[in-house]
Amino acid sequence: MEEQKEELLLLRITGQDRPGLTAGIMQVLAKYEADIMDMGQADIHNTLCLGILIRVKEQNSGNVMKHVLFKAQELGVNIQFEPITEEDYCDWVSRQGKNRYILTVLGRRLEARQIEAVSQLIADQNLNIDAIKRLTGRPSLNPEKHVRACIEFSLRGTPKDRSEMQNNLMQLCKEMEMDCSFQRDNMYRRMRRLICFDMDSTLIQTEVIDELAIRAGVGEQVKAITESAMRGEIDFKESFTQRVALLKGLDVNVMKDIAENLPMTEGVERLMNVLKKYGYKIAILSGGFTYFGEYLQRKFGIDYVYANELEVDDDGKLTGQYKGEIVDGKRKAELLRLISQVEKVDLEQTIAVGDGANDLPMLSLAGLGIAFHAKPKVTANAKQSINTIGLDGVLYFLGFKDSYLDV
């Protein structure tokens, strides 16, 4: 018996979306025993774009096109047919699953100029855009507080120069008031499990040691040392020792008042609620102080806190000394690695978020390192940064979509 020849046909269906449209098309295809080789759909403001790649017996292809066309007219949509060669199909299959990337673009608002710049950079690197989706909800026509906009590009191909692309993206972010994250699209990206935060100027909008210094009457001296350390101008351990010494004699009771009035960073509560709900392990790795880290731990249900312990004398006064090992940049990276081992999480599944020079080691070690409203030296050395919106911007770099969240 002679083997029946088969054809590959690509159906492109566009028009106003409506319930039952896909079912109607599939009813025709089922009648002629078509195999569905691939399909994809996008729906933008109730406007449908549906692509279906089918394999059908050559003798049935004419009837398939005729009856699908009739069905399309009945449904009020447009349809185009394109024959696909076996060679083109095999070439397409060979490229699937290889060298895939996710480029996330984030900002208070996104304009055509920003998307044009990003898409041109994608084209310059010979990458193909397979899909584009919006992760944030559709914006209101009226101005809102803390508005956010995020678009995610699914890319395929091999960048001509990934390092150059990364640098160019960071430069675009700086020039065009947006944030970008460029990640390889693999199972590690889809299964992040441990996130480690710096505390001061990351989870909270202050440096606690500066708050303590103000109460001790040495605010300007300590602030100057803090800023120099965060810029990476002096060694963190040295700066920490100098600043703690200036706090000598401060009553320990002031820490309670400071903790209860900490200015939380925009988006922290939403971020923490989502992370806890979806099973992430959360750690604070801070060059600040344990007292304040533990306060945030109780407030948000954080799993781990590692920070510095201030020494207190018998009269309830700070001695100007600290206890134990200083949590500096090197120690933060060690702790991230240790917690990942305890939680049996691959380092590629970890996330680190921080703003200071002492956060760079853990940002470099983590599978996803994010500089948050960071100092210039940190942003210059980070692969991802968030400077335009609140801390819940991290959720979009993890692939969360607003419509899936109820917090």
Image: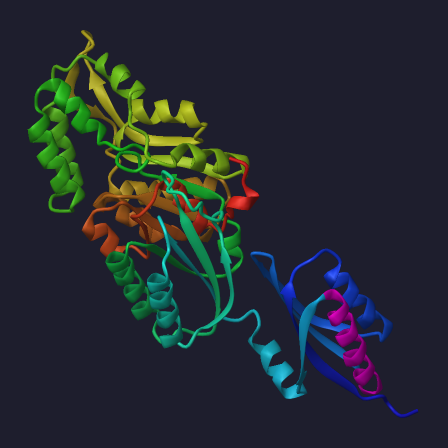
Q: Is residue 173 left or right of residue 59?
A: left
As drawn, 198 above or below 165: above
Query: What are the residue bounds of the magenta stretch?
Result: 58-75
Task: Quadrant for residue 81, please give it.
Answer: bottom right
Asked if residue 283 is positioned above or below residue 162 in the image, the reply reads above
Residue 407: x and y in percent read 51, 35
Residue 113, x across and y down, in percent? 33, 64
Instruction: Tell me where residue 293 sits by quadrant.
Output: top left
Nearer to me, 336 or 383: 383
Q: Quadrant of the N terminus?
A: bottom right
Image label count: 0
Q: Is residue 51 left or right of residue 380?
A: right
Q: Main secondary structure of the magenta part?
A: helix
* Front residue of this view, candidates 268 and 73: 73
The reply to whether residue 146 is visible in this rendering is yes
Magenta stretch: includes residue 74: yes
Q: Position of residue 389 (x, y in %)?
A: 34, 44
Residue found 79% across the figure and 83% down from its top: 61
